[in-house]
Amino acid sequence: MDFALPRHLSRAARTTVKAVRSLPRLTTVLTELRDAVQQIERLATFAAQELPEVVYQLESIRGQLTALERRLTPGSPHEEVMANGDSAEPHDKPITNGHPAEARR
């Protein structure tokens, strides 16, 4: 008698049962993955919205460092410094609290 067919059917049944039993865990993992992707999308949106402000702040810092470098470089035409430490020449940009909206007013 040939028992190969019942063995194959038995193996297929066991595999199917294992697959069905793993569905709840698979569903949980996919839900967690979807939630993680949504969080990454929120973070990317936040970063994209804040990038212009970061660039503005870095440009402001670069301007301040350039002004300091000019004041501290010996023989520089901008070497003249007042007694309180301020430069005798006007600033390149208006002084604000660091927000581009304030500089545009």
Image (cartoon, helix red, strand yellow):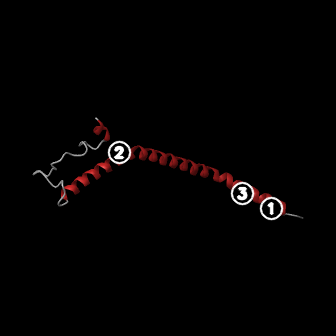
Circle number at residue 53: 2
Q: Are marks 1 and 3 in contact (CB under 8 Å)?
A: no
In this picture, residue 14 sits left or right of residue 100? right
Mark earlier in primary sequence (3, 2): 3
- Work out how far the residue at label 3 is from the one at label 2, CA to CA, in angstroms: 56 Å
Mark 1: amino acid: Arg
Mark earlier in primary sequence (1, 3): 1
Kindly identify which residue carries mark 3: 15
Mark 3: amino acid: Thr
Give percent across and percent down for residue 57: 31, 48
SS of the residue under disc 3: helix
Residue at the spot 28% in from the left edge and 38% down from the top edge: 102
In this picture, residue 6 sits left or right of residue 49? right
Above or below, comparing residue 44 to residue 75 in the picture = above
Neighbor class of circle 3 (other Cα within 10 Å; few <14, some 14-19, many 20+) is few
Mark 2: amino acid: Glu
In terms of depth relative to the viewer, which is nearer, 21 or 74?
A: 74
In terms of depth relative to the viewer, which is nearer, 89 or 86?
A: 89
Kindly identify which residue carries mark 1: 7
SS of the residue under disc 1: helix
Residue at the spot 88% in from the left edge and 64% down from the top edge: 2
Q: Nearer the viewer, mark 1 or mark 2?
A: 2
- Work out how far the residue at label 1 is from the one at label 2, CA to CA, in angstroms: 68 Å
Residue at the spot 84% in from the left edge and 63% down from the top edge: 4
Q: Residue furthest left?
A: 83
